[in-house]
Image (cartoon, helix red, strand yellow):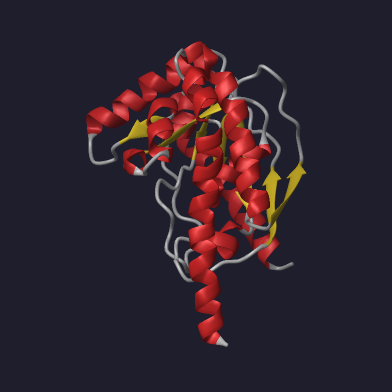
Amino acid sequence: MIVFKYIFWLFYRIWFYIMVALPIIIMFPLLILSILKESWYPYFFKLARIWARFILISMGFKSKIIREQQTIKDESYMFVANHTSMMDIMLMLVVTKNPFVFVGKAELAKIPLLGFFYKRTSILVDRSSPESRRAVFLNAQKRLKQGLSICIFPEGLVPEQEIILSEFKDGAFRLAINHQIPIVPITFADNKKRFSYTFFSGGPGKMRAKIHKFIDTKNLKTEDTRAINEQSKKVIYNQLLEFASK
């Protein structure tokens, strides 16, 4: 029986990479056009949402989005979520229609095909470089002034398998306070179970996400960063425990 499981997991992973590449190849001319100008990013974002939904459906994932509050069109937000899986990017793109830009690790730009577009549309950070971290703030400010939102996985890296939630870094929360935009905590319940970074694991099934009530940053100052960080983490942590009990 275990042999059949390993065979399934092997083909399931291969299928995933095929499903990631196929829509990119099909939409390649449109994707190229959409990144020629920064002002055309919302068009790229719409194509990215189609790509993400295609992957989720083709992998047998049934997404269920629970919303405590709705985003408003043309408003900017700071989206923060727990990081558990390669599927976090896809599910995040499905969660909201508000165009946002990912802030993510520079290593992802090395992924064939996907990395080409990731490098040109996301804000990349080399966590070993102080200059790179400072550049993230400047690039994020530029994007927010364009009316876009920002998405950051504040844990920075995917935590070890047994860790529910790692400590949050302050960057996302400092940015939100500086620009007086709402923080939107989002909890991903099943991504690690469905498609973790462990190669021989995962499978089709439900994929729940909960958008929590927004955290207002109006009238907050930089010294409030740590408190708002802890508040966001507590919301997501408690929700993970609630999901695990069901």
Q: Is residue 72 visible?
A: yes
Q: Where is the N terminus found, in terms of image quarters?
A: bottom right
Q: Residue at x 39, y 20 (%)?
A: 139
Q: Where is the C terminus found, in terms of image quarters?
A: bottom right
> In the picture provided, is 121 more to the left or to the right than 97?
left
Q: Position of residue 146 (x, y in %)?
A: 52, 12
The quarter holding residue 50 reads top right
Q: Is residue 85 visible?
A: no
Q: Residue at x 62, y 27 (%)?
A: 46
> In the picture provided, is 237 more to the left or to the right than 104?
right
Number of residue marks: 0
Q: Position of residue 39 (x, y in %)?
A: 51, 11
Q: Position of residue 119 (x, y in %)?
A: 37, 31
Residue nearer the viewer, 111 or 155? 111
Q: Residue at x 60, y 29 (%)?
A: 47
Residue nearer the viewer, 84 or 90? 90
> In the picture provided, is 126 more to the left or to the right than 74?
left
Identify whether 62 is placed above or below 212.
below
The quarter holding residue 170 reads top left
Identify whether 191 is placed above or below 151.
below
Residue nearer the viewer, 170 or 108? 108
The residue sitting at the bottom extreme is 1
Q: Residue at x 36, y 27 (%)?
A: 136
Q: Position of residue 108 (x, y in %)?
A: 37, 42
> In the picture provided, is 235 more to the left or to the right than 17?
right
